[in-house]
Amino acid sequence: FFAHTNIVFRTFREQANHIPFSDKRREMGTLNGYNACGGYQDVIRKLLLKLEEKQREDPEDFDIHSEKTIMETSYTALALIQTLYLPYHMVPGALVGRELLHWLNSTYVAQTDEGTELLKVDQPWLDPSFWPFIKSCTVRLIFRPVTHYLKQLSEEHEHPATREIADLIVAALDGMPSSEDYDQDADFFDALRQWKTSLHRLTRAKEKHSKSHYEGSVDMEEIVSLIAGKPDALQRICKSCDMTWREAICVYGVWVHPQLTRNDLPDITRELLEEMPVDPTNPEEMLQAALFQADIVKAANIANDIDVWLVAHMIDLLEIVPLPESAVITGLRKYFLIAYAEHVMSDPSLWNISITYLAHCGTRGLGVANEILMRLPFRLADVVLTEESKLPKALARSVGDRVPTLATLNQILDVCQELRLKEAEGAIIRVASQRYCALRLYGKAVSYCGKTLDTRALTRVVHLLLNEYFIGEPIDFVRLVDQIPSQYLYPAEDVSRDFNIFTSRLRFPLKYAEHHYYRSRETSLDNSASMLVETLIDTGTCLAPETWWGLLLTDIGDLLEQGVLLSEEHMNVVLTRLEEVYTKSKLGADSTYLYAMMRRYSMKTQTEALQRLDRVRFILIQSCARAMRMDVGGKDVDGRLDGEESVMQD
């Protein structure tokens, strides 16, 4: 039930939010509301069928009886809202008499068992139930049994007055026009005037026999008064036939006031209720009376006492109707929808339904939705664990497709994207990226960060990824970087500025991984050295973190020692960075520049790191000397520069 009505609600709200501001906005909103109201009724109708079946199996179950009563009340209330406030023809000023009659006859079906029993009697008019049955059917315009029995009365009764008046009543009922048969109201009123003119024979017959005592005189006189449109006759018949104000107001626009419109209903209902009060012990009647009087605030309070689902969806539908208290209704709508969402959340498995309602409740609802989603346990269903996998218990509870949590990560993110819950989406992605990092699935971590281009979350992922370099072998670090999707490592030229900023955080780990890839294969060492130098070039911000400068200088020194030569420009960059790192570290910059180098080579003191940098300085001098000799000399047979051996010996 919750899921099916949620689909109707979500469709209705999406359509309502996308209606453009125009002259037809009101009509389109009414049509959407009419369809949504019908959708809710279809869901309730199916549920009632199931409840009736359960009730037949267990008639003594109070819970089933209570739920069935609530659903029946909800169904009739929604059908009334559809009739009064969301008409299918989208014309609020149209005649409403016949529409109210249809609502009455469809939601409160008249009992015809008495009429069936009367068929077994030779002279049915002698039965005590005959005239109450005739009058109640006449009031509700169920003319077929009425005309059948009155024709029999006019043909078989011995008194001439009874036969005459019964025959004239049948003729009057058969000729009664209906507003639904005419396209224009003016045509209907013309036909109505002609019909009323034709009633003079019935009126004269009633007056002629007014002093006679014939069969059914009192009852037939009441029917004639009803046909003549007298309100007191309608009230007398309703009271005598155990009908309530509800039947009276629903046929008022047929018998008494054919020009009745929806704007007239509140005042007429109040007048009628003075003569036929509402049963204060019946919540269904009280709710319907408030709706007839257009007292939406009172109706909301009564509906809230009946069921939280009813009041939430009822006020949500009425919010699109242009009513004098629209501002108050808007506030009530948010309040009751949030209350309903909290009620749904009492079953945590329905979290997605609760979030849908909260997302349509303004700023406050969005705030609550974000808080719920950020605290919702989820699992990483796309992670395959082997039997040998050993994870901490806290992490193992959220990994794999067999973990019984409320939702998967993708399900929650889909809801966030669908409802545009950016705050929750960002927080969840940050948590998920940390879990993927703990599983050493850095490619997935980067992919999820890329959904929102969250550079802060990516910075944390990159930090953990670089930390992997110190834990295992360099080739393991290369494999971890290789997990990252290529669109983030090698972005296209036509991407957005935000995407470029996001992917820039990955350039250093990419270049450092490529360096170790080339070095492991002992190929393209010149390119490898150039890449490392580029990470140290200051173009506003260096690609390499300052904590890695010492290690990068050491790696560059190792490449130069293997015979790699740098360009003059790159050599100047390396010398500048080396001097900066060495000087600041020696003057007390703690281990800011030496952190990565000391950790990689398990150095215990800063002195060891500075000694390693001294060696790098010496290698740079050698490289410069080789470069200068290349300009004036050639290579030995073994590939060594002339005089290189003597320099090394010095």
Image: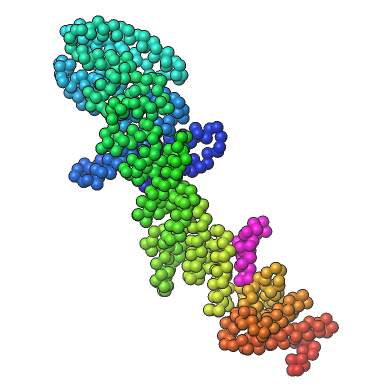
Q: Is residue 63 left or right of residue 350?
A: left
Q: Nearer the viewer, residue 384 or 118?
A: 118
Residue extending farthest to the right is 632
Of the 4 image quadrants, the one containing the C terminus is: bottom right
Residue 296, x across and y down, in percent: 39, 37
For residue 310, above or below residue 575:
above
Point 60% across, 80% down: residue: 595
Relative image position of residue 537 (x, y in whole percent):
71, 72
Tell me the chief SS of the magenta region.
helix
Pinpoint residue 547: horizontal percent, then vertical percent. Answer: 62, 77
* Residue 646 in view (yes/no): yes
Given residues 394 and 436, the one toward you in this image is 394
Query: Count the marks: how many?
Result: 0
Residue 350: in sight, yes or no?
A: no
Picture quadrant of residue 495? bottom right
- The picture quadrant where one finds residue 74 is top left
**Magenta span includes 423:** no
Q: In the displayed structure, does residue 272 sit left or right of residue 596?
A: left
Residue sitting at 16 percent across and 8 percent down? 158
Q: Is residue 199 left or right of residue 221?
A: right
Query: What segment is highlighted magenta in the picture?
Result: 482-511
Judging depth in this view, the residue of 379 and 429 nearest the camera is 429
In the rendered view, does 144 fall on the left or right side of 267? left
Please, is residue 637 above or below residue 324 in the view? Answer: below
**In this view of the protein, which residue sits in the foreground, 361 or 151?**
361
In which quadrant of the rendered view does residue 147 lie? top left
Q: Is residue 496 magenta?
A: yes
Reply above or below: 86 against 259. Answer: below
Q: Which residue is located at x 25 percent, y 21 percent?
A: 237
The percent coordinates of residue 338 (x first, y second) are 41, 49
